[in-house]
Image (cartoon, helix red, strand yellow):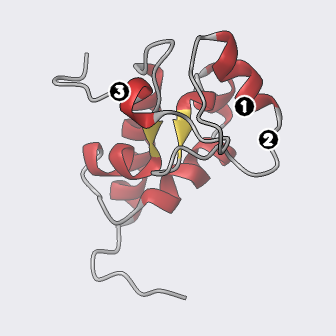
């Protein structure tokens, strides 16, 4: 298991989770963000896996557009077959390799709302 030199306190982890949910809430239809970009915006760039855990285990995430979060190559979450369908319904374009076309669909917010 990887050791992080920047471990979170309980309060920092709580705040991180709230920030992650707030960022995901703002991703517009037809756009995606990566786990790593969300972690960086939340102030913890080395915690992209924790973004995934937050989205998977937070009860509030059920009402958020979590399907708009992909990995840095544009791959969808393994085991979530509906994610691609949800993204395509919003006009997200996929490349022949099955990855989201990040050049077209990546959302880079200048300022979070």
Q: What residue is drawn where x is 36% and y is 56%?
A: 11
Which numbered disc, 3 or 1, marks the residue that appears first in the sequence? 1
Left or right: where 99 falls relative to 11: right
According to the picture, the residue beneath numbered tag 2 turns out to be: 80
- Quarter of the image containing the N terminus? bottom right
Whether pointer 2 and pointer 1 mark residues with C-beta atoms closer than 8 Å, the reply is yes
According to the picture, the residue beneath numbered tag 1 turns out to be: 83
Residue 20 screen position, x and y as percent: 42, 39
Residue 62 screen position, x and y as percent: 69, 27
Report how far apart the C-alphas of labels 3 and 1 lie in the structure: 17 Å
In which quadrant of the rendered view does residue 83 lie?
A: top right
Whether pointer 3 and pointer 2 mark residues with C-beta atoms closer than 8 Å, the reply is no
Residue 44 screen position, x and y as percent: 29, 58
Categorize mark 2 by other alpha carbons within 10 Å: few (<14), some (14-19), many (20+): few
According to the picture, the residue beneath numbered tag 3 turns out to be: 107
Q: What residue is drawn where x is 36% and y is 81%?
A: 4
Report how far apart the C-alphas of labels 3 and 2 lie in the structure: 21 Å
In which quadrant of the rendered view does residue 67 lie?
A: top right
């Amino acid at each position: 298991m990887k050791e992080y030199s920047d471990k979170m306190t309980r309060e920092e982890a709580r705040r991180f989770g709230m920030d992650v949910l707030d960022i995901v809430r703002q991703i517009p239809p037809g756009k995606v963000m990566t786990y790593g970009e969300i972690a960086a915006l939340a102030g913890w760039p080395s915690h992209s896996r924790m973004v995934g855990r937050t989205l998977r285990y937070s009860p509030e995430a059920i009402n958020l557009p979590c399907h708009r979060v992909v990995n840095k190559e544009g791959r969808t979450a393994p085991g979530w077959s509906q994610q691609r369908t949800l993204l395509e319904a919003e006009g997200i374009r996929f490349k022949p390799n099955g990855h989201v076309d990040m050049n077209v669909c990546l959302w880079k917010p200048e300022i979070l709302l």
